[in-house]
Amino acid sequence: MISLTVNGTTHQTEADPDTPLLYVLRNDLGLNGAKFGCGLGQCGACTVLIDDKPVFSCLLPIAALSGRKIRTIEGLGTGDKPGPLPAAFEAEQAAQCGYCIAGMIMRAQALLERNNRPTETELRAHMATNLCRCGTHMRILRAVRRAAIVMGGGVRGDPQSAL
Amino acid sequence: MSGLSRRQLIGSGVLVVAFSLSRATKGQELDKKPVLAGSLEKSPRLESWIRIDAEGRISVFTGKAELGQGIKTALIQIAADELAVPPARIELITADTRRTPDEGVTAGSRSLSDGGSAILNAAANVRMLLTETAAWRLLTDADKIELRDGAAYAPNGESLGYGELAAMLSLRVEARPDVPRRDKGTRLIGTDLPRVDIPAKVSGGAAYLQDMRLPAMLHARVVRGPSDGTRLKAADVDAVAKMPGIVQVVRDGGFTAVLADQEWRAIKGLRRLQAAGWTRPGVLLPVEDMAEAIRHLPAQDVPIFETPGAPPPPDGKTVKARYARPCLMHGSIGPSCAIALWENGGVTVWTHSQGVYPLRKALAELLRLPADKVRCIHVEGSGCYGHNGADDVAADAALAARAVAGRPVRLQWMREQEHGWEPLGSAMVVELQATLGSDGRIAQWRHDVWSATHSTRPVSAGGLLAGREVEPPFPAQIPRPIPMPEGGGHRNGKPIYVVGNAKGVYHFVEPSPVRVSALRSLGAHMNVFAIESFMDELAKAAGTDPVAFRLAHTVDPRARDVVQAAADRFGWSRRMKGGDGRGCGFGFARYKNLAAYCAVAVEIAIDRDSGEARIPRVVAAVDSGEAVSPDGIRNQIEGAIVQSLSWTLHEAVPFDTTRRTSFDWSGYPILRFDGVPDRLEVHIIDRPRQPFLGTGEAGQGPAAAALANAVADALGTRMRDMPLSPEKLRTVVRKA
């Protein structure tokens, strides 16, 4: 039995200790946000926050996670009261298939919590870990810029790219 | 019905009689064969598309599927607009073989032209019936009835709700093609209704098939070799069957699936079975250059077009060029998934296939069931961009679940299975030759394209991976060229430009050395890349501006408008002079020469040290006919451009003689946030009341060509072989 603290609630799980966190989140806790994309830490669809840092939940066995602070997109707000990033993604209609989006939001959340005034270059470099195949990148960037303002900061234009 | 007066209707006593009279009238007109809109031609009954219950709830049925392209929202907009109700009053039911019309596959950018037009016309018919029924009951004339918010109002203020009206009429009638569209009141078509699927997608809601959890559901993995064409060696099945949580290892000939109580345990079982190693039983692959191999394999010659004209002048300037594209992957971020449940001697399959009806047919054959014992229900998956593993995994799940009737089985492919087994977009070669007359116009044109098929979508059991693995195996499907005007490898193989003495030939390579099928825009990506690159080469030979050269060969006014709009918005005439790694390029096409028009202008800056291309700016203009959802069109075109930039700059499936050698994203790099354009604008030319032309695939070719033309402008060197990778660009930029 391993105990996991997810979005502020502690859960006991009987899953095998080598089970990556992703499968426990999805199948045992019924949280849909983190997605299976590659199982290899290459695409970021499974991104969640552990102790406020973005990690690939498809790689981390639960045995290593007792007592750590795990956060998923479900912890960023509710349907009626979405957090700044989910609200911004909805406002910008920043999804096509949307399979990557929960991972994108969690990665952006980690950045904006640490630095709500990143430069455009920093924003792009930070988000470059996560893959989107529909080509929704421009809208995702717009959504993060919008959320940065709501979170009291803003993305600073990079003179090199004339943004 | 419109020919009958209200008194005649009341006199007839029963409304249904009036409809049958109306049918009789139509029967006479039928000699003239009026054509019903889009998919209505195949499913003409109104009740197939629209039902209204006694409470006034409206159900709209579509055989098209949401693939992330926003089709649900657009179809709701169309139905709500025509029925004069708020969109929230409409429940849309998508592709389900038990409930919705058969609209084939959701592909070819045809969802709005096929399905949208059908729903528009069906809704117009229903609105007419509601109006006329209301007029009959409220003792007024149909043209005095006002519809709003789900009720019909007479001038005296009396009203009847749609539910009450629906109870008085039958929708079990065929649509009439000539019912006019609603021309009063506020419009929903042309507005940016927020997408109905987005809230769940940005909040961790249940949005995908992958998120479905049915009671007592088991998890499964299919067991295969590393890629298409390989086979696993015999594995120690008994040892795996004894692993914790393993419920069963299902085998049928070469088909193997492992079922477990927990997903991770199924994966551990899979890994153990894969450890046995693999072989390649068939012929080895021609690996050195897949496009070059395709160019020289046996092919069937299929004419694309032939336009007569005077022979070119003997002193004309002849230009030749050869362009190539490697095999490309769909590369959905979420590997394919399906859930199957056997009950009562039949099976229900939840699938993200693009074609639930064709899949049902193939599954029925595979499972040796009558078609009515197989139900395929579409649930959204990860974006597909064409024929990926969706159909195959549905068959895998159905076979795996057969062993545990009564329990749903969820089977998802692993990343390396999607990379290794999905059908690829074929490698292609295009050779172009043209002669310029002394007037600087094109006087002769020849287009040759070599490609394997662009559709192996399953229509029989042999079109599914598992169908070839079970014992006895089903015969493989033999692909045939998709006929023009849509075309497969020859899609957009005819230039939109006015050129005489022109000819195109499709060299259809069959069999293909590797598994290939439909990838977004099929051959259009390559043909437009080649034609539009070549137009720039010709413009250079003619000493003319590339956009001016295009316009000089364009008569279609809508084509001219789109080219001009993109050029104006980009500031084409004021653009910087190309050179020193910086430049601008233009690309244009009308998708399939019958759908949406799209022009793209790109500015590029290539880093001298790394060869990395930075894209400061992209401007596109698009005419998709009547714009149902302008923001939906922008979203699709933005996506098409970014995806096409990724294909064209970075992507190529590598092989060795036995298999694909890209098993994951490390071996198949795609565009990331640090490589997408700094700015990207899409301008829509709306054409109210013109037919819907579709949007999804219109940008792939023009974006690829605009990029290649920008590279040529920046480097002074034409690059004709995709991908225009940083390594290649680095080599050229250092020589420049």
Image (spheres, helix red, strand yellow):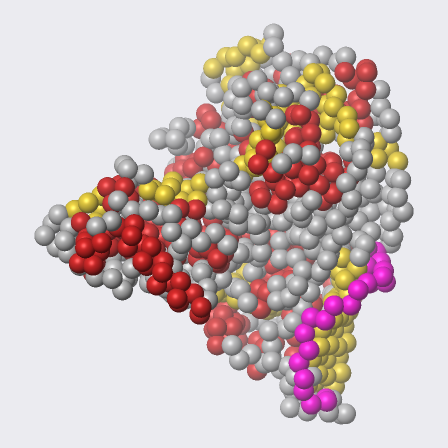
The percent coordinates of residue B547 (x first, y second) are: 57, 76
Query: Would residue B300 be counted in the magenta stretch?
Result: yes
Q: Please give left or right for residue B185 compared with residue B112 in the image.
A: left
Q: Residue at x 27, y 36 (%)?
A: B55
Q: Residue at x 28, y 37 (%)?
A: B54
Query: Would residue B722 be counted in the magenta stretch?
Result: no
Range of the magenta residues? B289-312
- Residue A149: image quadrant is top left
Image quadrant occupied by the C terminus of chain B: bottom right
Q: Please give left or right for residue B691 compared with residue A49 in the image.
A: left
Q: Please give left or right for residue B668 compared with residue B96 in the image.
A: right
In depth, the one of B528 and A130 nearer the eye is: B528
In depth, the one of B270 and A86 nearer the eye is: B270
The percent coordinates of residue B450 (x first, y second) are: 77, 64
- Residue A154: image quadrant is top left
Q: Is residue B685 visible?
A: no
Reply above or below: B313 against A26. Answer: below
The percent coordinates of residue B328 (x first, y second) are: 71, 51
Q: Please give left or right for residue B236 compared with residue A73 in the image.
A: right
Reply above or below: B615 against B284. Answer: below
Q: Residue at x 39, y 67 (%)?
A: B29
In depth, the one of B720 and B314 nearer the eye is: B314
Q: Residue at x 19, y 53 (%)?
A: B10
